[in-house]
Image (cartoon, rainbow, N blue to C red):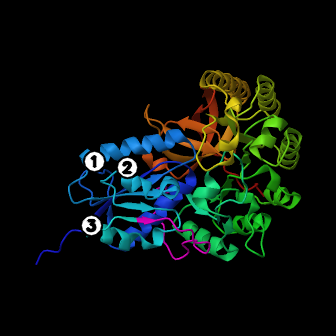
Amino acid sequence: MLQSPRPTVYIETYGCQMNVSDTELMLGKLTESGYESVEQPDGADVILINTCAIRDHAEQRVIGRLGEMKSRMKRDAVLGVTGCMAQRLGSQLLDRARHVSLVIGPDSYRDLPLLIESARSGIRTTATEFDLEEHYEDFTPRRFDGVKAWIPVQRGCDYRCTYCIVPTTRGPERSRQLAEVVRETESVVSSGISEVVLLGQTVNSYFDGQHDFADLLRAIGNVKGVRRLRFTSPHPNDFSAAVIRAMAETEACCEHVHLPMQSGSTRTLKRMLRRYTRERYLECVDKLRKAIPNLALTTDVIVGFPGESEADFEETLSAVELVGFDDAYTFKFSLRDGTPATRFPPSDTVSDEIASDRLARLIATVRAGSRERNLKLLGERREVLVEKSARRGGLLQSRTRDFKTVMIPGDVSSIGRYLSVELTGTTGSTFIGKVVPQRIALPLAV
């Protein structure tokens, strides 16, 4: 008697690394429940769109994608929306897209197999309750990346920045127990992965009731086999002296911090409710750089925030130049329903024309500074970890400890290996490198 084939599932992911990690959790749960993961939605029994809600543009992309799926999915397929947009809109998504059967928030993935089975019988479901105890400790993620592992250590956020939807979509902050993070790290290392990225909405505010983020960094850095340790995204307010000292003293901690600034203007930062001033941000940068030589910094910056004047924007440009960021993720402000920013008067609105102009000037400033610094690095030798094949050119993409992207020649057998490279060229944002032999220390003659 022929055995029936396993049902198939396709998951498409939008947004941040936390969403990538959540997709890995969902795939792990569904694989354990008898599903087979596939690379395309056509013909899949289950299609899940794992969503982001941080900006309106991200949500509009998902709405468009749901429309496309209607013509691509087979008649009896189950289509679900998961993640932050699902949490924010809830049953509205079922009303807007009749071919969607499931709307599932980030704290409801444990019930995913049962919810899918209900959808097969015609029951359309919304599951968006917060569960402040849920960390999916018993899930085994199905990791996409064989080179680095995303490990969530904290979910939710207690900061209430006026522009941010995350507290609404992810709930209040809660941290995993340190022992559980260590256990997962040991499991990751045993599979052959040597780079670990700790994830949290404000990851350096981690506290499990007994251990803080400094304790966590030291514990993970001491796991045998962890060669590179990164984390994202921290908040400037939570870089205590103990955390900075732990970073400096933990050998595996990489010389890179993604430090969201959002604005270089104290006036705008106050309206954003970021809870630090321009001066305190620059002081944090100074403390990090004094403790960690050759530290690379990247950041997030928003332009066009309600009430942002030209003088405020000029302060942002000057802060970018003062810090000398290696790169920046730059955005025009996107108003999100349910955030305090909706209560600013319409007269504070910055026109799209002005915001677009400021964004272009900001990008030009970031790129000019990055190019100038990168040109000075040409000829240096760096250790890189080969991550994947590049999109074009027959090259491999690799990364230095300080998060520089280096394209090198080679074949896929080098993926996952540490190599020594010489930086031979730069596009301004990325490098071209050549592999150089690693020197082997020979014993002295007696």
User: What is the CA distance from the residue labelled 1 to the residue labelled 2?
Assistant: 13 Å
Specify which label sits upstream in the sequence, 1 or 2. 1
| Residue in front for this viewpoint, 48 or 412 | 48
| Residue in front for this viewpoint, 436 or 415 | 415
Determine the image quadrant of residue 268. top right
Placement of the C terminus among the 4 image quadrants: bottom right
Of the two numbered discs 2 and 3 in the rendering, the one whose residue sits closer to the viewer: 2
Determine the image quadrant of residue 210. bottom right
Helix, strand or loop for the magenta stretch, by majority:
loop
98 sits to left or right of 304: left
Q: Position of residue 81 (x, y in %)?
A: 41, 56
Q: Which element is circle 3 on?
A: loop
Q: Is residue 134 magenta?
A: yes
Q: Position of residue 311 (x, y in %)?
A: 81, 24
Specify which label sits upstream in the sequence, 2 or 3. 2
Query: Which residue occupies 74% across, 30% down?
Result: 308
- Give the labeled residue for mark 3: 122
Instruction: Give the crowd class for mark 3: few <14, some 14-19, many >=20 residues within 10 Å.
Output: few
Q: Is residue 421 magenta?
A: no
- Give the labeled residue for mark 2: 96
When the figure is inspected, residue 9 is found, relative to residue 321, above or below; the finding is below
User: What is the CA distance from the residue labelled 1 to the residue labelled 3?
Assistant: 17 Å
Specify which label sits upstream in the sequence, 1 or 3. 1
- Give the labeled residue for mark 1: 70
User: What is the CA distance from the residue labelled 2 to the residue labelled 3?
Assistant: 17 Å
- Disc 1 residue type? Lys
Determine the image quadrant of residue 239. bottom right
- Disc 3 residue type? Gly
- Disc 2 residue type? Arg
When the figure is inspected, residue 353 is found, relative to residue 41, above or below; the finding is above
Q: Which residues are magenta?
A: 126-147
Q: Are marks 1 and 3 in contact (CB under 8 Å)?
A: no
